[in-house]
Image: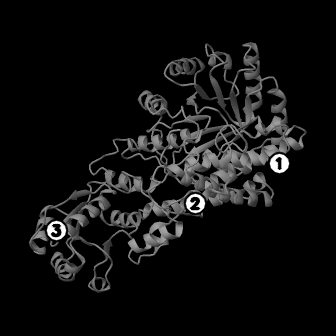
Amino acid sequence: MEKFEKLFDQFSPVSPEEWRAKAEVDLKGADFNKKMVWRTNEGFDVQPLYRGVDIENLKATDSLPGEYPFVRGTKLNNDWAVRQDIDVDNEQGANAKALDVLSKGVTDLGFKVNAGTDLETLLQGIDLRKVQIDLMCCPKCAVTLAKKLVAIVTKADAADWFVGSISFDPFKHQFKHGTPFPIDIKATAVELMEIVKPVHHLRVFSVDSLMLNNAGAYIYQELGYALAWGNEWMAMLTEAGYSADEVAGRIKFNMGISTIYFMELAKFRAARQLWAQIVKQYNPSCDCAGMMTVNAHTTSFTQTAFDPYVNLLRSQTQSMSAALAGVDSIVVEPFDACYHTPDEFSERIARNQQILLKEESHLDKVVDPAGGSYYIEMLTASLAQEAWKLFLDVEDKGGFEAVLNAGDITNAVNASAAARMDKVAKRREQLLGTNQFPNFTEKSEGRADNIDYTAAEEGTLNNQRLASQFEQIRLATEHATRAPKAFMLTIGNLTMRLARAQFSSNFFACAGYEIIDNNGFKTVEEGVDAALAKGADIVVLCSSDDEYAALAPEAFKYLNGRAEFVIAGPENDEFKALGIKYFINVRSNVLATLKDFNAKLLK
């Protein structure tokens, strides 16, 4: 028999303790936990390295795709439906658009409709046995639309094949308006259960945690609240006399996808595992009742109106996370959706982003490719643990509806959004093209004129994107009589002056200021004179810390208030005593500093 060598068998095993000891030697006295361990927003630490021993006690790693608790997926393949949402203002026009996009790779149509929508016309020519249909509507429209849709599906003899949903979700109103929706939720839910009985795969109870994601919720929050949201439906309808199998089969999760790539991948895996365990507590006749159906939607929270093509990079990695995680369908938000109604071009690009993942990257060919990865499995387990704590906390307080009505969920998500915006203000969370590496010469060209930057009313869910405050600063600059000029007075140590000039240029370009960089000056007098000749409003001294001792007082005195003086470097009490106010560095609150300069300089 042919003998095979084990890969790397010439190397002796290394214990975790030995690896840690060697890493600490290489760190040369620096704190291991501060340098190497990532503290997540979700409340747990991520280590720099994971090994087989770390996942030994994780039970779900022994399951296969399609097996309970479905952490590895509910399917034996990794195909997903490519969904595009369509606003229905005119049934014939929407139908024509639907038929067109079906020929371009779409397999799932989401229609935004109302009670008076003519579904016969809207769905004309669409094969209801092959195309998934999702109707998004207000809660009061759900019963009427369900009756219409069931009649159409039955007439088409497609009841056994049809897959789709109607978004009955009265809880969303509370998040948007701060008050409960005026409807008898339980009575309407029971009515819907009866109406949809003839169509086996029509889901009518929505869990729209996408709106939490779009409001800035942390990942564990979206997951924990989504589970409680789904459990509210389970408890309500099983108490009404329906079986766990019946109720679970009518629930659909619409979840967001943020930009944290591996964490989002782990989120969907953890979601399936936890949902399966929740459903199991209702004693279904089959574990398969716990199979979670998830539509994943790229987030609008991180979209930007400036440098908007970067949104394509964001949505591409987001959709990739969801695809690798094995969701059932994906909606890619067009890159320009945050500042106007998407046009044919941006919708085509959004569709093609998913098609690329299938046809070019073949992500639909392998089920749960992340399964067994020490890192992903640990992220999945850690996220599941934090989300489960939150779920139990909600249940202890009376369940999802009670906690929602008390305002606890809205307040928690808004607090997370505020914390994230503070990080963006200080560049601890980066938005490429907005708070870091902006396009210096870009103008909005009217893109942002129709954006409503008015903050949500108290008691309602945050409606601002991460980029909103930076965009408002840049728009104010753009609409001013002229943009302030920031002049880089580069002098002394070549390496330090170049690095600090680049940092400072990016800093002030975030506000749309005109940036004037320079190769270097021999004296501060030469630099100040050049700045004033250019009409500079801000002079930024860029050199090394050691050289600032002599250069900063000299430059400040010679400038003599003829422009704002800024030192690119750490704050210094001696310089402050001279009257120098502004220091910019990696610890600066970029947003607050730029607001201050806008208040001084814009006319």
Is 513 displayed left or right of 555 in the figure? right
**Number of residues whose C-alpha sits closer than 10 Å to that of mark 3, classed few (under 14), some (14–19) or many (20 or more):** some
Out of 122 and 372, give the one closest to the viewer. Answer: 372
Question: How did the renderer colour the structure?
Answer: one colour
Q: Secondary structure at mark 1?
A: loop
Q: Amino acid at mark 2?
A: Ser
**Number of residues whose C-alpha sits closer than 10 Å to that of mark 2, classed few (under 14), some (14–19) or many (20 or more):** some
Out of 321 and 403, give the one closest to the viewer. Answer: 321
The percent position of residue 383, horizontal first and vertical second, equals 62, 56
The percent position of residue 187, horizontal first and vertical second, equals 85, 38
The dot on residue 434 is: none
Write down the residue under mark 3.
494
Q: Residue at x 76, y 48 (%)?
A: 277
Residue 147: image quadrant is top right
Looking at the rendering, in which quadrant would you find the C terminus?
A: bottom left
Mark 3–mark 2 Cα distance, whole angstroms, equals: 42 Å
Write down the residue under mark 1.
281
Which of label 3 and label 1 is nearer to you? 1
Q: Amino acid at mark 3?
A: Leu
Q: Is residue 160 visible?
A: yes
The dot on residue 416 is: 2
Q: Amino acid at mark 1?
A: Gln
Mark 3–mark 1 Cα distance, whole angstroms, equals: 67 Å
Is 323 displayed left or right of 487 in the figure? right
